[in-house]
Image (cartoon, helix red, strand yellow):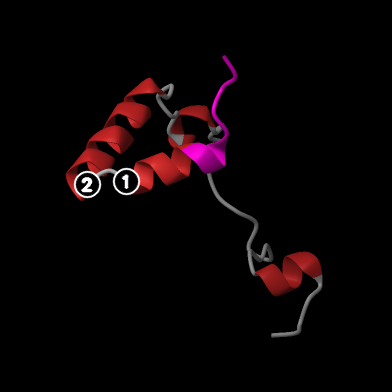
Amino acid sequence: MEAPTIEILVKLVEQLSEDEQVELVRRIEALLPPRQRPSDTLRVFHVEHFPENMTLRREDEYDDDSE
């Protein structure tokens, strides 16, 4: 038996009641692996201070003065 296409699945889901659609989404989300929080994967660098002439403005960083 061939696996149904996304289009067929969407047509079938459209036939469900709103409550059934919500339950389906809940079940699909339960199948997904848990997402990692960005704060769990980003490296953090601690510094004592920034140089006084250091700018964090996008325009300065990318030499972009246009708005």
Q: Depth check: 3 or 61 in front?
A: 3
Query: Is there any visible trace of residue 47 in the rendered image?
Result: no
Tell me how many marks there are.
2
Q: Position of residue 64 (x, y in %)?
A: 78, 76
Q: Which mark is residue 32?
A: none
The residue that appears at 74% across and 71% down in the rendered structure is 60
What type is the residue that disc 1 sits on?
Gln
x then y, percent, for residue 24: 29, 34
Kindly state the secondary structure of the residue where label 2 is placed. loop
Residue 20 percent coordinates (x, y): 22, 39
**Residue at 44% across, 45% down:** 11
Label 1, on which residue? 15
Residue reaching furthest front?
A: 1
In the image, the segment drawn in magenta is: 1-8
Which residue is identified by label 2? 17
Give the residue type that dot 2 points to: Ser
Where residue 43 sits, quadrant-wise, is: top right
User: Please, what secondary structure does the residue beneath circle 1 have?
Assistant: loop
Q: Residues within 10 Å of mark 1 (few under 14, many from 20)?
A: few
User: Predominant secondary structure in magenta?
Assistant: loop
Which is nearer the eye, 53 or 58? 58
Q: Quadrant of residue 22?
A: top left
Which quadrant would residue 59 be assigned to in this image? bottom right
Residue 45: in magenta span: no
What is the C-alpha distance between the residues marked 2 and 1? Answer: 7 Å
